[in-house]
Structure formats: C-alpha cells, structure tokens
Image: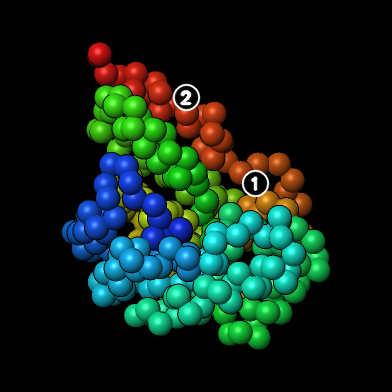
Amino acid sequence: MAKSLAITLDDSPRSATGYFDGPTRAKELIAEIERHKLPQIAFFSVGNKADGEGKKRLIQYANAGHIIAHHSNTHLDFNKHSLSEYIADFEQAEPQLNTLPNYQRWHRFPYLREGDTQEKRDGMRRYLKEKGYLNAYITLNNYDWYLESLFQKAIAQQQKVDFEALQKLYVELIIESIEYYDQMAVEYLGRSPKHVLLLHEMDITALYLGDLVEALREKGWKTIPVKEAFHDDIADYQTKKVFKFNPGRIGEIAYDNGKRKGLWHHSLDETYIKRRFETEVLGNLKH
C-alpha cells in the first residue's frame, strides 16, 4: 500500500514583499497545485492578515477548491500568554475567517505550541471541543520557513541565487524529514499513518511544491485530501505530556512510548540548513 500524506500551508496570507508579491504568489501557487494534480489542501490562516490583498488571496485559494482554517488572530505564541489571552485572540480571528468560502472548524496552534502548562493545555482542549473545532495536528515537521528566510535575505541583498540548487535543497530537506518521521511512526505506532505535512504559504512553496510532490510520488507516496488524513485514528490521540515545544503527533506518540532523544530531525536545525544553503545555493555560483 502506498504511503500517504496531506498538505497543509500555515501562516496564510503570509507577508509577500520579496521575490513575489501577494497576487503573484497566489497565482503561481494555485497553478503549481493544479499542474501537479494535488488534491484539496488546507490554508491555516491568521485573522488579522485576512484583509485587503490578504483577504483576496485567501478567497482565491478557497475558490480554487481549498480549505481555509483557523491559525489564531495574531499568530500568538501560547507559551507567552495566558489561557484567557489565547482564547480572546482566537475569538478575534473568527469573524475574519469564518465568513470565507470553504471555512472549516480546524485550529492549528502557532508554532505548534499547545500550552506549556497542564491548565493551559487542558483548557484549550476543552474550549476547542466546546466550539466544535478539531486540533489540526501535524505528523511531518520541517523548517521550510527558515529556508525561505535565507532565500528572501539573499534576494534582498541582491545575491545571485542558484535556483536549480535551491529547488534541489528544498526537496531534499523536506523529504529527509518526511522519511524520518514516517520511520518513527512505523517504530512507535506500528504503521505508516495518513500523514499531515506542515508547510507554509511562501514563495519557495509556490516555486517548488510540485517538484516536492513529484519526488515523493517517485518514492511511492500518494497525496490525499486533508479531510481524509484527519480521519486517521491518531486524530483522537491525546498525550498526557505537557510539551513546551511540541514535536508533532508522531513525536508525541514516540515520547509516550519511551523515546527521549531525536524528536526533532537534524534537517530542522537552522545551522545545518544555513550551511547547506550557503554552500549549495550561494556557493555554487561564480561571482
């Protein structure tokens, strides 16, 4: 049986003032999704960005058939705020997001931080249940956002970027992390679940998402709609551990079964990513 994953994009509509502007990013990303025949994906969206051009972008994604979901109002770090402050921020986002087409009652915690005390964690679990929201967990983590920051910095500084090398690095880093967490799932869950891949609504996503998907397909992976992934049995799993920094659902399951080291793969290390970016993407070019 083919391994499967669904694609989710956080932080939409993310700032677009670098390589692409917002309308261009949306156009390119939608074209990339359609060109590579991806099933429905989910855009976890920040309420206070869902106005003006940002709102138009979200509507474009929704009109292309994709899901809009909840990612707080101000991308709040739950570790730095009380339960009441987090709930207030959550509620501010709802009128900005729940009137958009294809809105689903799914909430993803910014930074995957679900509460650094039992009171906060359990309080949000109760609140989401009362509101009818799914905790939109992830199983496959990566630092695509950091690679994007290096790319945008290079563009801003007018450095020469080897785009072919950037595409290769993007695909390799994410596949490294996918294969690592899938192996962890097989070891601690006993199977490869219907995975949920965390990515972000960014320029490198618009440039290379299709390349990533084709590379995964060559390795035997199948892309599935997000709704299908969230019907896996692990959707109901709740760890008893309070994580200040959450490793994702597979990391939770592994921890609860005795794993203490390696909950984050080395491909999520900023030093590792920066070294490869500078060597492979910038260093390969003759100036």
Residue 136: which numbered mark, if any? none
Q: Quadrant of the N terminus?
A: bottom left
Circle 2: residue type: Arg
Task: Indicate left or right for 118 with 155 as reference.
Answer: right
- Residue 40 at what x, y percent from top left? 33, 70
Q: Quadrant of residue 175?
A: top left
- For label 2, the residue is 275
Query: Residue drawn at (39%, 60%), measured in percent from left and top?
Result: 13
Asked if residue 197 shows in the view, the reply is no
Q: Quadrant of residue 271?
A: top right
Q: Determine whether the residue tagged by mark 1 lies in a helix, strand or loop.
A: loop
Residue 263: which numbered mark, if any? 1
Q: Mark 1 or 2, which is nearer the eye?
A: 2
Residue lying furthest front: 52
Q: Quadrant of residue 128?
A: bottom right
Q: Earlier in the sequence, mark 1 or mark 2?
A: 1
Q: Residue 285 versus residue 154: which sits nearer the camera?
A: 154
Query: Residue drawn at (68%, 79%), measured in percent from left and top?
Result: 127
Query: Residue drawn at (59%, 63%), measured in percent from left and top?
Result: 109
